[in-house]
Amino acid sequence: MVDNQTGRQPHLISVRGLSKSFSHNGLRVEILKSIDLDLYAGETISIVGASGIGKSTLLHILGTLDRPDSGTFLFQDKDVLLFDDEKLARFRNESIGFVFQFHHLLPEFSAVENTMMPALIRGASKKEAKESAETILVRVGLKDRLSYRVNKLSGGEQQRVALARALVLKPVILLADEPTGNLDEKNKSHVHDLLLELNKEIGMTLIVVTHNMELASYMSRSVTIIDGQLVKT
């Protein structure tokens, strides 16, 4: 829906004044200082910069895996920071997909069994979950690996299973933290292409934390964090 007054889509995500600090050797260290950020449905954005500047901290807050010390986080005009833990977990399962540098798959389970997990958690039947998992695994190029245990797959194949698991429920937001950090150049390129293709096909908002400037350049915009503040790059 487009706002009739502005002619633009309303924000999918709007955060204001997000701040986060940690205690280190008895000192309070401010990582994020009153961060403001607006994101639209289907947008792609990279968060780049050196280690330790707060990129992953911001991503974890946007993914509701962590809470800020202060600020508001509106998702479709609802402040998700006001949700209790149960409602927040349900929101995360229904609306957000995660891909990390380390795939965090269960090695004793097959590719399709790992990919089914989010759907089963949501309450889908085993048949429905398996059908959804197989569909997305075929889409990411693993048609011949559905029944393979994860520990029998290559690194690139494992990361594609992780991507399939993140997207099996067609989330509104996909958060990727160094998704190609452990891959060789060929597999990096493959995952880059998949992220962008699936962003267009599914229409999810894509937020990527990366050191890889080639991947960052593919995003519609790029930001970094300097002295706790969000800055365009």
Image (cartoon, rainbow, N blue to C red):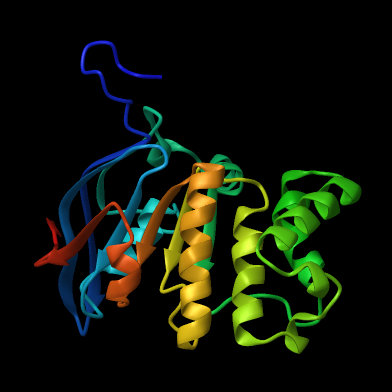
> Is residue 162 placed above or below 79 in the rendered structure?
below
In the image, 30 versus 14, the foreground residue is 14
Q: Is residue 101 visible?
A: no
Q: Is residue 29 visible?
A: yes
Residue that lies at the very extreme toward the left in this rendered image: 227
Q: Residue at x 58, y 76 (%)?
A: 103
Q: Position of residue 163 (x, y in %)?
A: 59, 64
Relative side of 4 to 174, left or right: left
Residue that lies at the very extreme toward the top in this rendered image: 4
Question: For the N terminus, which image quadrant?
Answer: top left
Quarter of image, res 181: bottom left
Q: Position of residue 37 (x, y in %)?
A: 23, 45
Relative side of 143 to 39, left or right: right
Q: Residue at x 51, y 70 (%)?
A: 191
Q: Residue at x 83, y 79 (%)?
A: 148
Question: For the C terminus, which image quadrant?
Answer: bottom left
Q: Position of residue 218 (x, y in %)?
A: 33, 61
> Is residue 145 placed above or below 197 in the rendered structure?
below
Q: Position of residue 10 (x, y in %)?
A: 32, 26
Q: Residue at x 67, y 52 (%)?
A: 168
Relative side of 117 to 225, left or right: right
> Is residue 148 placed above or below 36 in the rendered structure?
below
User: How many numbered marks are there?
Assistant: 0
